[in-house]
Amino acid sequence: MSGPTTLSGPGADLHARGVRYALASFVDLHGVCKAKAVPLDHLGAMLTGSELFTGAALDGVPQDVSDDEVAAVPDPASAMVLPWRPDTVWFASDLQLAGRPFEACSRTILRRATEQAAAMGLRFNLGVETEFFVLRRAADGGLQPASASDRLDKPCYDLRGLLDNLGWLDELVQAMNALGWGVYSFDHEDGNGQFETDFGYAEALVTADRVTFFRLMAREIARRHGLIASFMPKPFADRTGSGAHFNMSLADLGSGENLFTPDDGQPGWVSELGRQFIAGILRHAPAICAVIAPTVNSYKRLVVQGSMSGFTWAPVFICFGNNNRTNMLRIPGAGSRVECRAADSACNPYLAAAMLLAAGLEGIREGLDPGDPNLVNAYRLSPEECSARGLHALPRTLGEAIEAFAADPLSRRVFGDAMADAYIAFKRDEWSSYHGAVSAWETDRYLELF
Ligand code: GLU
Ligand code: MG
């Protein structure tokens, strides 16, 4: 395993470390990496944008087949030598077209939002909790937890389950730490076969790069153990889903001081600036939901109970509050940050962070007030109590969410027209493709009912 990479001249130390290939990587609409590999001798050219791509071949890189290619311009600061393949180095890239930023590039979209924060003297700090399943394909084609003994009804924090999986987990955590991410804990999550690895927060662009790389790395390390790492939000109806809780705060750009620390030092809360940030997100929550919970399957996670015995721990209402996990926006016990619990592991972290940040900044600019926090178990509120408290439900389907995204002017402001149009078209199509399929649930229920 190798430490974090700094480039002093194209490839100088990389060559000495035995690196032979460099990847100019960027993401499609799903946040999945696309790249070209170049031999290290060509790194200098690659860093200036030599690698060209036809956007029309990808989801959500809106281009016509006849358009000029986009160029991936790697960010040298993002370099990561693949811990499982130390002869190859990965770079997160921004896309350019004809020498100018490509408006619809996910990383550029987040960069634009962070530049708006910077213009207000703010830095967006972000930590993302990565929940995911690690599964084994059984002989009959079914999916089982990685370890056969992982069968408890309540496997959360189960030590035996953790130890049984320590082989691949240890490899993953070592790899994360070799990259300098500062893992501070990892555990067995609430579903059989489900795990979470938590690492230090950083500036949003760095964290989005890491989450992107993490999915690639977890998948690869699991694969080497004959396992499947899945970031599908809700693979099993009777188990909890995989959230990607976004822990957010704004710091003073100059001093680095956390500006969400409560003004009166009151523990477990956030400052007035933090409350305004919350209010901006609440205002745009339905549109944001289409990006932080981006799939048909995401909405099967955002339920109270489903067919499982316990709760899902996923939010269902547009609300904020204290350390209570039923809130969409939770202020964890230590305070000074806001955790968005509606985000799931399938989100494109650049687009998700950009929407959340832009909405929060709007709340600050307009001095919005989020109202009273929700301090009760939102899962137990009756519809009457919800309306008395002015609580609205999060979108219940991708169809509802994408229409909210299409109707909210924030979406275009953040994504730009081309990417907003591409996102809306892709997600409407995803929803109608799902809606057009007849599922086993329907035939089981209706075929002979009437
Ligand atoms: N897995 C839950 C979710 O879908 C969250 C559990 C937790 O609080 O860590 O969001
Ligand atoms: Mg968790």
Image: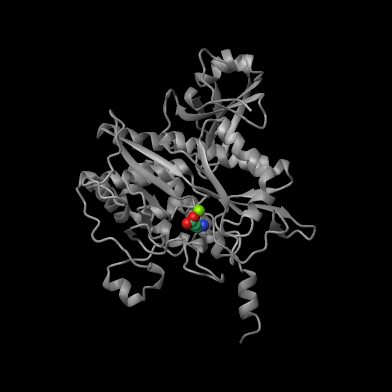
Can residue 123 be seen in this snapshot?
A: yes
Q: Is residue 201 above or below residue 42?
A: below
Q: Is 234 left, or right, of 412 in this rendering?
A: right
What residue is shown at x 45% (from left), y 52% (from top)? 343
Q: Residue furthest left?
A: 367
Quarter of the rendering containing residue 45: top right
Q: How is the image coloured?
A: one colour
Which residue is nearer to you in this view: 163 or 35?
163
Q: Is 134 left, or right, of 417 in this rendering?
A: right
Which residue is nearer to you in this view: 380 or 44?
380
Q: Is residue 445 above or below residue 293?
A: below
What residue is shown at x 61% (from left), y 28% (from top)? 36
Q: Residue furthest bottom?
A: 450
Image quarter in which the C terminus is found: bottom right
Quarter of the rendering containing residue 58: top right
Q: Is residue 282 above or below residue 260?
A: below
Image quarter in which the N terminus is found: top right
Q: Is residue 37 above or below residue 144?
A: above
Q: How many marks?
A: 0
What residue is shown at x 31% (from left), y 55% (from top)? 282
On the image, the x and y values in percent for residue 197 come to 54, 45
Which residue is nearer to you in this view: 202 or 139?
202
Can residue 105 be seen in this snapshot?
A: no
Which residue is nearer to you in this view: 357 or 435?
357
On the image, the x and y values in percent for residue 230 come to 61, 50
On the image, the x and y values in percent for residue 429 come to 51, 55
On the image, the x and y values in percent for residue 280 come to 28, 51
